[in-house]
Image (cartoon, rainbow, N blue to C red):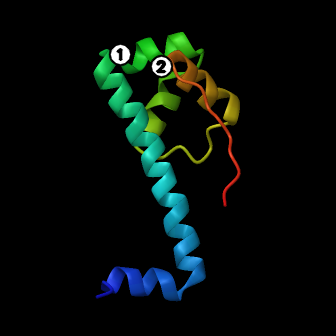
């Protein structure tokens, strides 16, 4: 049985695209939050390590990072001990 949510998303390509973008943003935010908690890193410490302002880290943590540039985000991810890999979507 298909859920109402699935019917809504599957029947409207624009809604599906918007959902997928917002979900990916949410996942990135959750990833940064989880790694900061696991490593016990404060916003200010991570910002200093990544060479960005604490505001940038706060925007990512609050899932409000639409205007964060790739270089800043990459620096943050690298400062947490990770790297970004790109692979083709099938």
Tell which of 61 and 87 is nearer to you: 87
Q: Nearer the viewer, mark 1 or mark 2?
A: 2
Q: What percent of the width, then of the height, locates residue 65?
A: 53, 43
The quarter of the picture where residue 34 lies is top left
Q: Which mark is residue 80?
A: 2
Circle 1 sits on which residue?
41
Q: Dividing the image into 4 quarters, which one contains the N terminus?
A: bottom left
How crowded pointer 2 is (Cα within 10 Å; few <14, some 14-19, many 20+) is rated as some
Q: Is residue 84 left or right of residue 40?
A: right
Tell me whether circle 1 and circle 2 mark residues in contact (CB < 8 Å): yes
Q: Secondary structure at mark 1?
A: loop
**Residue 16, position in %: x, y?**
53, 74
Q: Residue at x 54, y 85 (%)?
A: 12
Quadrant of the rendered structure where residue 40 is? top left
Q: Secondary structure at mark 2?
A: loop
Of residues 88 and 66, the one nearer the viewer is 88
Q: List x then y, in percent, for residue 82.
A: 53, 23
Q: Is residue 18 left or right of residue 9?
A: right
Up-down: is 14 above or below 25?
A: below
């Amino acid at each position: 049985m298909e859920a109402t949510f699935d019917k809504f998303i599957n029947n409207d390509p624009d809604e599906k695209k918007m959902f997928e973008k917002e979900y990916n943003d949410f996942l990135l935010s959750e990833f940064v939050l989880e790694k900061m908690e696991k490593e016990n890193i404060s916003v200010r410490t991570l910002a200093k390590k990544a060479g960005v302002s604490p505001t940038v880290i706060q925007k990512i943590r609050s899932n409000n990072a639409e205007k964060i540039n790739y270089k800043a985000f990459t620096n943050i991810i690298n400062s947490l001990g990770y790297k970004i890999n790109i692979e083709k979507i099938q």
